[in-house]
Each structure stands twice: as C-alpha cells, then as structure tokens.
Image (cartoon, rainbow, N blue to C red):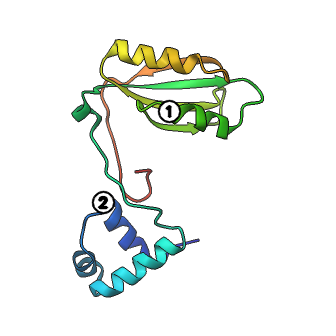
Amino acid sequence: MRLNQLDERIVRALAEDARRSYADIGAEVGLSAPAVKRRVDRLREQGVVTGFTVRVDPAALGWETEGFIEMYCRSNTSPEDIRRGLERYPEVVSASTVTGDADAIVQVFASDMRHFERVLERIAGEPFVERTRSVLVLSPLVRRHGAGSPA
C-alpha cells in the first residue's frame, strides 16, 4: 500500500516521536486532532502502523561495544530458522538476510570485548551456523530512527 502525502507526514511525525499528541501532529499537518486520530486508527487497521515502541540507547544499559556478525549458514537454513535462533539473544538489536556471500548480518551490542566475544561464540555455535565473520564499530557516523528506516 502506498501512502498519500498527508498520511506519510503523519507517519513521519509518529516515527520521530510516537508520544506526540494528535493535536500537535494535527497542527503540523493542518488537521484537527480527531482527524489525525481517525487517520492513525485507519493506518493501524491497514497494518501500516504496526505498533508504538521505545528506543533505548544501548550505552544506558552499559552496552558500548558494537559489532556486526556475518553469518554463513548451512544450505537448508530458512530465514525463519535464523530469526528464531537469534531472537533469544538480547544483545542482537537487528538481523537481516542479505545478498552476497553471507546469509545474514547481525548487529550486536555488548558491554565490552569479552561480552561481544561470548555472544559471537554462542551465535557461531548455533546448529544452523557454518561459520561467522565479525567486525567491530569504531565510530557510528549516521543513525536514523524515523520513517523510512527501521525503528
């Protein structure tokens, strides 16, 4: 489903701050609060807006080491198998199947190098994983959490 321009502006406002009031969003997009609520309700019913969440800075949890793990899986591994295997790890903040040699890429936050290493070892030990390759983040350059990017 393709959003019209007004719905897209409402979704962007919610993506920037899901706690904004309908009146505040309405003032920005030129609608009344009840009109914004009706549109948001419709967007939820249509599955465009799938929920509201909180984003926590991993550093607030003491997790300041960030890395990415490329996973190379056994040939009969489905994306669902990978998802189920990785969702048990609270350190995994995102995981996606990818093109190229690797089957998936996994973003991990950990408290320190040893913690990252333990997570890497556990993921590498999953029965569907053939091998892994990891890289550590030195300095994050761009992070977006609004519409058009995963939250």
Q: Nearer the viewer, residue 53 or 108?
A: 53
Packing grade of label 1 (10 A; few <14, some 14-19, many >=20) is few
Residue 64 percent location from the top left of the image: 28, 26
Q: Which residue is drawn at the image coordinates 22% and 76% (left, top)?
A: 24
Give the total of numbered labels: 2
- Residue 40's quadrant in the figure? bottom left
Query: How far from the left and from the top, in percent, is residue 124?
Result: 57, 17
- In the picture of the structure, the residue carrying the numbered disc 2 is 16
Q: Is residue 77 above or below residue 43?
A: above
Residue 54 horizontal side relative to residue 119, left or right: left
Tell me the SS state at disc 2. Answer: helix
Q: Find residue 61 and name its label.
A: none
- Residue displayed at 51% across by 14% down: 121
10 Å neighbourhood of mark 2: few (<14), some, or many (≥20)? some
Q: Tell me which amino acid carries mark 1.
A: Arg
Front residue of 123 and 138: 123
Instruction: Tell me where residue 101 appears, x and y as whole percent.
Output: 66, 26
Q: Quadrant of residue 113?
A: top left
- The residue shown at (66%, 40%) is 80
- Give the CA separation, mark 1 to mark 2: 28 Å
Q: Residue furthest right?
A: 76
Which numbered disc flags the more N-terminal residue, 1 or 2?
A: 2
Query: What residue did someone put label 1 on?
Result: 88
> Which three-letter amino acid code belongs to the residue tagged 2?
Glu
Q: Tell me if 59 is positioned left or right of 123 in this view.
A: left
Please state if 127 lies on the left or on the right of 134 as rendered. right
Indicate the position of residue 4 as horizontal and vertical percent values: 48, 78
Mark whose residue sits in front, 1 or 2: 1
Secondary structure found at label 1: loop
Q: Is residue 96 left or right of residue 31?
A: right
